[in-house]
Image (spheres, rainbow, N blue to C red):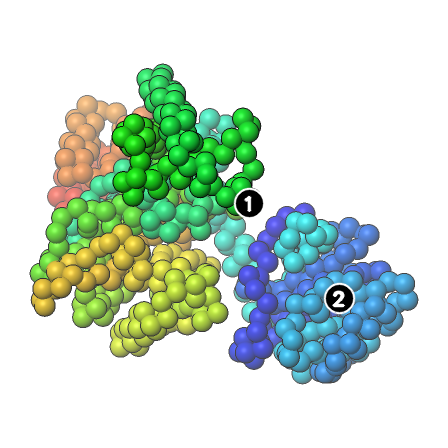
Amino acid sequence: MSAEQPEPKERKTLDDRQKMTELERIRHSAAHVMATAIVKLWPDAQFASGPAVEKGFYYDVELKHRISPEDFPKIEEEMKKEIKANHVFEKITVTREQALEDSKKGRLGALAERPGNPSKFKIGNLEDIPEGEPITYYKSGDFIDLCAGPHVMRTGNVGAFRLTTVASAYYKGDERNPQLQRIYGTAFKNKTELEAYFTMIEEAKRRDHRKIGQEMGLFVIDTEFVGPGLPMWLPKGAAICEELEKLAKETEFAAGYVRVKTPHIAKEKMYKTSGHLPYYAESMFPPLKYDDSDEFKEERAKVFTAWLNAEVQVETLAEPFVKDKLNPALLPKPDHEGKHGDAIRAAAFELVDKGQAISELTTAVAEYRRLDAELEKLKPEIYYLKAMNCPHHHRIFAAEPRSYRDLPLRLAEYGTNYRYEQSGELFGLMRVRSLNMNDAHIYCTPEQFAQEFNAVNDLYLKYFKIFGIEKYVMRFSTSAPEGLGKKYVNEPELWKKTEDMVRQVLIDSKISYVEVPNEAAFYGPKIDVQVWSVIGREFTLATNQVDFAVPKRFGLVYRDKDNTDKTPLCIHRAPLGTHERFIGFLIEHYAGNFPLWLAPEQVRVLTLGEEEPLLNYAKAIVSELRANFVRCEADFGTDPIKAKIAEAEKAKVHTMLVIGGRDMDAGNVSVRLHGKGNLGAKPKGEVITDILAAIKERRA
């Protein structure tokens, strides 16, 4: 069994269900048809939930028989019978009591009542339906299920479908619950769309970045010595990283960004102030504690001993004066020596603070407090690996006094972050534990926000054009009132203000977007950038976030025109995402056939012969290209030219310059492009000039 898709985050509301697309309704209905087929084949099947999901549908089932792909044909055959029967999807509204009674009789998720075999998971699902929400069944033929819908009109409206895989899943996603079999399938309006989808899936397998990355020697993940999720870039992969950084630095410099560099670790205080601790702790690596030096241990032991002695001194001096004032009924349990040390010290402190203590006690309390403060300073320092760059950038903003004249301030960094993704979630370059982010934080006034946010969106559009990304959508995630103070910062007015501003910028810039409630960052609304590769595969590329809360937590201010201190808004943006995820996307987008400017090996010079003048001519071309920072290699070996070309094609070298005696005599080179073949002989100078221009212009 394998895992394919995660459990949906939350149960859909009735409003969400009414917004389901036609395709989602087809897939939801297909899940019911599949359940009908399964229960006809295995009458003891117990069903849990069967929703439509991003790539199709699934149904969770408890069954003694272990379903495998070998069972798919007979399940699909039964499904076809249900579709041909063209049963109506009939909606039936019932009371909660009726639903509970039917569940106990085993009637839900079944073809008939099953005495002694209650629909146990439906009883659990019933508990999740809020009071006041209508409880409904959907009936198709003899199959009745607890379901809020919606569905297509008839089973015959379920278009073309196919079962895909089997996975394991805990009931309601809780590992304390029974483990069920999750049967996945997908459905489309017609067979043409279904076949197109599976053609895309096969092409995606061919373009898998893990496969191509290994074949091209771009990166390696050494789980034995380095660790899972920690990719290392080999020279060819590092070349792509450097080209992306160069693109970002040039673009950001032109847009008025300034570059900064920050450490890979920070104190615990940093992340407590930002709010990432404790809420983000599960995604961070465990803390690093620095307290193991002999000098540190000796110093702490010395101060601790003195502190204990001072504690005893305070209690000894204070007890005769405070004993009568202590109320036995209010005292806590005595310590192991039968004393009430904490209460005595508290009373002593009160006497000293009121100036009513003898001089010896005043001196003893002062020494105790001094040692207590020193002991606090000698606590082990706790550090965390940097999981995000924003707190460091906030401290850079705070490092100097700021005026409204300094804003907007755009701080950029390709920062290395570390996030402890669960081992089951790691996936090639797409989900890693070490990531290099094209990060920047823009500090601005409310009046500057729209222009700055729009400029960031323009940056995305520029990059989309460079990389040939034609289909994209901005996923605008907002808060939800019920989450304020829990999931989100409790600032309702600021939430409304910033969400309105982001929404208006998106509308004014005519950028395609969808609004998704209750998925914002904890400190402000965000935009997740969804893109599609040339074969139609969807990726989450980057995130653009508005932060009105954390700058305030760090005390960030600028002096405004009216001579008052105000907190800036902060825009978090990362148009190129991380090296890891973005290069993973590009590998699959281009199938490893990168454009010249981005190709790991841009040019390879191949010789047809071994004569010294020919080799000298070829070496001069290599030298000239490398002098202009072109990634150029040479193959001057004795293999036949066809073998050399085949080897270069296999390595996905973008441009091959084949040189023989005639080329040398004419001052030419014969040009071949990867996957496109021979372009013929051209003057050497013209070819070199065109190569340099194509790289500089970042031609597709």
Quarter of the picture containing the C terminus is bottom left
> Is 521 displayed left or right of 616 in the figure?
right
Give 537 or 638, whichever is nearer the viewer.
Answer: 537
Q: Give percent across and percent down for residue 202.
A: 54, 54
Q: Is residue 657 visible?
A: no
Q: Is residue 354 above or below residue 132?
A: above
Amino acid type assigned to the residue bearing label 1 in the image: Ala
Image mark for residue 329: 1
Q: Is residue 66 above or below residue 524?
A: above
The residue singled out by tag 2 in the image is 123
Q: Give percent across and percent down for residue 328.
A: 53, 41
Q: Give percent across and percent down for residue 311.
A: 39, 28
Q: Is residue 124 above or below residue 377?
A: below
> Which secondary structure lies at badge 1?
helix
Q: Residue at x 69, y 78 (%)?
A: 135
> Which secondary structure lies at badge 2?
helix
Image mark for residue 81: none
Classify mark 1: residues with Cα within 10 Å, few (<14), some (14-19) or many (20+): few
Q: CA distance from mark 2 to mark 1?
A: 52 Å
Q: Is residue 147 visible?
A: yes
Quarter assignment of residue 655:
top left
Amino acid type assigned to the residue bearing label 2 in the image: Ile
Q: Give percent across and percent down for residue 100.
A: 78, 72
Which of pointers 2 and 1 indicates the residue nearer the eye? 1
Give 298 or 473, whichever is nearer the viewer.
Answer: 298
Q: Residue at x 30, y 73 (%)?
A: 497
Classify mark 2: residues with Cα within 10 Å, few (<14), some (14-19) or many (20+): many
Quarter assignment of residue 658:
top left
Q: Residue at x 27, y 52 (%)?
A: 554
